[in-house]
Image (cartoon, rainbow, N blue to C red):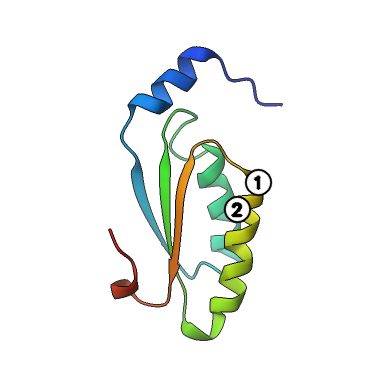
Amino acid sequence: MLICNQTTRRNAMSKSIKRIAVTGGAGQIAYNLLFRIASGEMLGNDQPIALHILEIPEALKSLEGVKMELEDCAFPLLKHIQIGSGSFSIIW
């Protein structure tokens, strides 16, 4: 059970959003890593993040499913998710 006090929430609101790019987003390793990042296990429970997830064009349909799962979890630190198949499809 995650307990979050008011101080933690205030700090999360005042910090700038960190943008994280993950390649191979539909793969097993990235799948597990994405949920850890979104939950705050990687950068701390007060750091808001935006995920930019890349995958090969053939796996974009699977990546859409991963994106929907992340959105369904409603992680409070996850402010934005963008997916694409090439580095030029990601807008920083």
Please give the name of the residue rendered at 48% of the width and 84% of the height, measured from the top-left corner.
57
Q: CA distance from mark 1 to mark 2?
A: 5 Å
Give the answer, above or below, for where 5 lies relative to 86.
Answer: above
Across and down, in percent, residue 55 comes to 47, 74
Q: Is 46 left, or right, of 28 in this rendering?
A: left
Residue found at the very far right of the displayed protein: 1
Q: The C terminus is located in which quarter? A: bottom left
State the residue position of label 2: 70
Question: Which label belongs to residue 6?
Answer: none
Q: Is residue 27 visible?
A: no
Question: Which label belongs to residue 73?
Answer: 1
Give SS at disc 1. helix
Q: Is residue 3 visible?
A: yes
Kind of residue indicated by mark 2: Leu
Across and down, in percent, residue 81 comes to 47, 55
Give whichever of 70, 37 is nearer the camera.
70
Mark 1, residues whose alpha carbon is within 10 Å: few (<14), some, or many (≥20)? few
Residue found at the very far bottom of the displayed protein: 58
